[in-house]
Amino acid sequence: MPQENFSSPIIELQDIHYQVPNDGQNLSILNGCNLSVQQQQSIAIVGRSGSGKSTLLSIMAGLEKPTSGSIRLLGEEISRLSEDECARIRARQVGFVFQNFQLLPSMNALENILMPLELFQIEFAREKALDALDKVGLSNRADHLPSQLSGGEQQRVAIARAFVTTPKILFADEPTGNLDETTAMQIQNLLFDLKQTHDTSLILVTHDMNYAKSCDQLWHLQHGTLIPWQAE
């Protein structure tokens, strides 16, 4: 795949609509969302529960198809591509961090981080996975299963797995939602530190306004539309 010039937006949404069937009618979740994200920017999206934030994130990553509108991700129009074609674009260039960690319970911390490296047949996979564990401060927990780790430790493993392929963009969906306040702050700092280290763009969905205000841009998803946040 040829290298793209990311002086243009790394993600660009144009007039994104998303509807789902509901009692014989169409329920509108997104109503004309527009957004442009440059390389290395951090963008936070806030909004009430059920407003469609996670749906929007999935559409931006090519995991869901919009009802209408255009999405360019990493220089390619993805709204009309097949799932296999979207997966090819995401491979090694897109990372994900979720609220519920999504670690494989039968794999230890090191094996969870190794998984994407082995999937993409990346050289020196074990060394890179061990280095990623070290960067999140869990070198001594490599052999532990997720059930043997605290919530904060599990999220650190998930973050290490997300960054181990040095993605150009990271999508984070409520990454501190299941954590206590102190642990949440540690995870927030870790995400921003690794984003800076890897020159990664960050798209963050969160309920934590202090966290959101740390980003370069803050958007409010309201009535299905992205509105620039204005402090009251």
Image: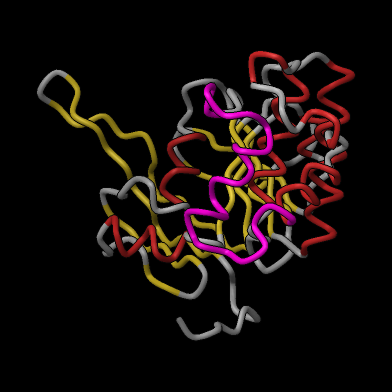
Q: Residue at x 46, y 50 (%)?
A: 33
Relative placement, left or right, of 69 versus 61 is: left
Color style of the picture = secondary structure
Q: Position of residue 54 (x, y in %)?
A: 49, 34
Residue located farthest toward the left when viewing the structure as drawn: 24
Relative placement, left or right, of 19 versus 43 is: left
Vertical comparison of 39 with 56: above or below: below
Q: Position of residue 65 (x, y in %)?
A: 30, 49
Q: Position of residue 107 (x, y in %)?
A: 57, 29
From the viewer's side, name the closer residue of 4 and 51. 4
Q: Is residue 218 magenta?
A: no
Q: Which residues are magenta?
A: 102-127
Q: Is residue 122 magenta?
A: yes
Q: Where, by quadrant of the figure, is residue 195 drawn?
A: bottom right
From the viewer's side, name the closer residue of 204 and 141. 141
Q: Position of residue 228 (x, y in %)?
A: 66, 47
Q: Residue at x 82, y 47 (%)?
A: 192
From the viewer's side, name the closer residue of 87 and 64. 87
Q: Residue at x 70, y 42 (%)?
A: 229
Relative placement, left or right, of 109 versus 152 is: left
Quarter of the picture containing the C terminus is top right
